[in-house]
Image (cartoon, coloured by chain):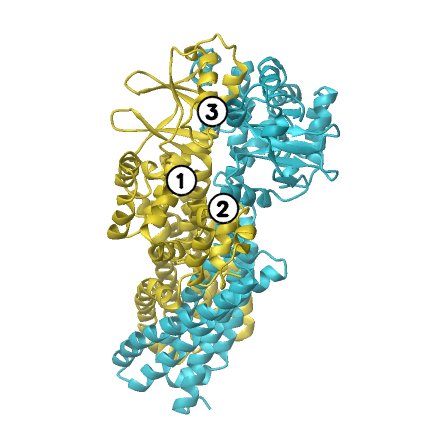
Chain colours: A yellow, B cyan
Amino acid sequence: ISANDSQRVREIAGDLHESDVGDLIETLEAEDRPKLVELLGKDFDFAALTEVDETVRVQLLEELPPETVAEGVRELESDDAVYILEDLDEAERAKILEQIPAPERIALTRSLDYPEDSAGRRMQTEFVAAPEFWTVGHTIDYVADAEELPDTFYEIFVVDPTYKLVGSVPLDRLLRARRSKHLSEILEDDPRTIAATEDQEDAARMFERYNLVSLAVVDEAERLVGVLTVDDIVDVIEEEADEDLRALGGVTGDEEISDPVFYTARSRIPWLLVNLLTAILSASVIGLFEATIEQMVALAVLMPIVASMGGNAGTQAMTVAVRALATQDIGGRNARRLIRRETLVGLANGVVLALVIACAAGFWFQNAQLGVIIGCAMVTNLVFAGLFGILIPLTLERLKADPAVASGVFLTTVTDTVGFFSFLGLATWWFGIGK
Amino acid sequence: ISANDSQRVREIAGDLHESDVGDLIETLEAEDRPKLVELLGKDFDFAALTEVDETVRVQLLEELPPETVAEGVRELESDDAVYILEDLDEAERAKILEQIPAPERIALTRSLDYPEDSAGRRMQTEFVAAPEFWTVGHTIDYVADAEELPDTFYEIFVVDPTYKLVGSVPLDRLLRARRSKHLSEILEDDPRTIAATEDQEDAARMFERYNLVSLAVVDEAERLVGVLTVDDIVDVIEEEADEDLRALGGVTGDEEISDPVFYTARSRIPWLLVNLLTAILSASVIGLFEATIEQMVALAVLMPIVASMGGNAGTQAMTVAVRALATQDIGGRNARRLIRRETLVGLANGVVLALVIACAAGFWFQNAQLGVIIGCAMVTNLVFAGLFGILIPLTLERLKADPAVASGVFLTTVTDTVGFFSFLGLATWWFGIGK
């Protein structure tokens, strides 16, 4: 369809929702994407670009003429415009900003000046503000007639003459109040606000906690500068959970499924190299017991079982801890309780697993003593797994590191090392071999 | 404070937001919780109970007299009421429902009749509906005077005489329209709806995709029965991401950090037993090569490295796949591309790791041939890891199983088995030992 020019494309794609247009763009081949945008011309809603992967977006924007992009971006709400511009490189972004008239350009630049992933980056600078002394009737009439209003809004912010936030009036409350009342009588005082420089994740926490639909963003002087709306926050929450999950899976950075092979491989290799190092470390523990293994090969067969079960149990404890930290469910007081709980859970499950593996190993190698030894090693490793499964994320959090990213490596190093050492060490001592 | 009765408690806790009251309840000892509720009396907002862990909620509700609960629940929006009642056992719930007057009871029962985690369970049955022929002015006046309105609402639903949804009018649009216009002229036609029996996750996808603030819920006859609001959906999204993350970490079920040791241990052990079984399975692969290991103990030292690197690389591929499946980013067409990509990424990173480990192992054991063999085994295992890291979740999804839950076990079984087999097998063949 998009090979030959036509207005068929407009007919098909013109009426779609921006998310659907975004999907359409992603399924097209890279070289067809700019064509689609040009064919759609004025009918192309640049908001669709907020719905595609970063790689696709950056590539497409670089191929379009800056004038087209500038015009498209002007049509957008400021938060979408910033979202589209923020990933471009400096030069490209400057070229597009040049084409935008001064007042809008200044607003965009100010948002772009806030740190990445801050509330100021995500906020929309269009909002409805009114002074305290206005009546409900006056406000309703103002809203009905005003020209420059955001596309959607859920509350009216009430500000003092210096633009400091005094309160907010949700639209439903405005509608239900008498026209003669003053805004000061119906406003929700002490409204929740967030500083523009704060992290978007903190904003997300506030939305979740207080079931907000929009949240006022203020600058250092407590003046109202923008508003965060829940639809942007939904994306933040999703992203954040995604980050934790990927980090636990050893996928750092912002890999997307449309990334090419080379890029993906390169972004994943550092993590693998770190793991290789720790794997060699734990293997060197086995190296200490070469003589023991030579005399009893069954140990080599069984040792990965002890190590891997420790890894599994530790990961369970760690997963719960990482999520609880991310959602700020762990405080000083229950931290100690959690450490005790995880250690005891490790002990309990260690005993169960020890019984099973002791019987299995005993029968397999016709050696009851070997069964007892693997059982003891299993209990030891699971207690360590539980303890470190919670201690490692807690410590990383205290050191201001992201517990989701690094916990896994440390944990498997501990469980592998303890697993190999306890099992091979016990066997060496008990059977008096390996000297 | 809550040991001796007083109205100090009211002063302190009376003005807090429901989330903060929820936190307060969680930090109290179990026996003090019902006391707090009783001390607060009418000042206790049962909405606080939607903010605490399930275990805490159920325990507290069972200790309170049914009349108190019934009265508290009546004050709530229907969705919060359902949320509080749904986890109670049948008998307890019936006792509370008995105390609620018929009309409200029937509405609650109807919501509770929808399947767990469905849109019908999460919806609020209070909403504002108006017929098409009403004018904007009439609607505004109606809203201003009506008594029984939901606490908060963001749009007016326009319905036909049979209560079928015709469209919706967001409040900001209502405010901006002329009073003389008919709703039929300003409504958003073809509004998005969801069937009450559909899963809440599908609803969450719609909110994310179309940036909604509220979504109409309809019954089988397409009649409007309720509304989902974004604050509930934020919780659903968070829960859903949480579930995936826990599932990948081997924590199934709905474990919460306030659960006691025994309960936690019991809920985690099944997963560990499954893993034990697969660990024994992969260990038995090592068992096939006992004679080889006896002749060359270095193999026992190195084999866990090959296996664990496969596990790490496979987990990376799997994590990306599981999340992409959860957010419905994988379709038929890019599935094949992804499979190719993951295999090639496995190959590329396999080669890099192979070079490193070949040198390391060669020097360590002063045996260049051993280095070549571990390198070859590493490449083989990483290709399998990439391939199965994506194939396993895709297959599970096609079999309608949850890819997040089971992928991990299958994957490590594959990478351990392939890792041990390729390394030990190659060594046996190359050095001609183990016969």
Q: Where is residue A9 in the image (x, y as percent from the top left)?
A: 53, 55
Gap in angstroms between the C-alphas marked 1 and 3: 44 Å
Q: Which of A347 and A181 is in front in this view?
A: A181
Circle 3 residue: B21
Query: How would you rate the neighbour count of disc 3 (Cα within 10 Å): few for under 14, some for 14-19, many for 20 or more?
Result: many
Gap in angstroms between the C-alphas marked 2 and 1: 14 Å
Q: Position of residue A87 (x, y in %)?
A: 32, 50
- In the image as oriented, which residue stretches furthest toward the front? A6
Gap in angstroms between the C-alphas marked 3 and 2: 40 Å
Q: Nearer the viewer, residue B244 or B301?
A: B244
Mark 2 or 1: in front is 1
Query: How would you rate the neighbour count of disc 2 (Cα within 10 Å): few for under 14, some for 14-19, many for 20 or more?
Result: many
Q: Which mark is residue B38?
A: none
Q: Residue at x 52, y 34 (%)?
A: B213
Same subunit, tags 1 and 3: no
Q: Which of the 4 image quarters holds residue A108?
A: top left
* Relative to B193, residue B333 above or below: below
Circle 1 residue: A75
The disc numbered 1 marks a residue on which chain? A
Tag 2 and tag 1, C-beta contact below 8 Å: no
Circle 2 residue: A18
Q: Which amino acid does label 1 sit on?
A: Glu
For label 2, the SS is helix
Q: Which of the 4 image quarters holds residue B111?
A: top right
Q: What residue type is labelled 2?
A: Glu
Mark 1 or 3: in front is 1
Mark 3 or 2: in front is 2
For label 3, the SS is helix
The answer, for residue A346, to whether it is visible in the render is yes
Q: Where is residue B432 in the image (x, y as percent from the top left)?
A: 41, 92
Q: Nearer the viewer, residue B334 or B283?
A: B334
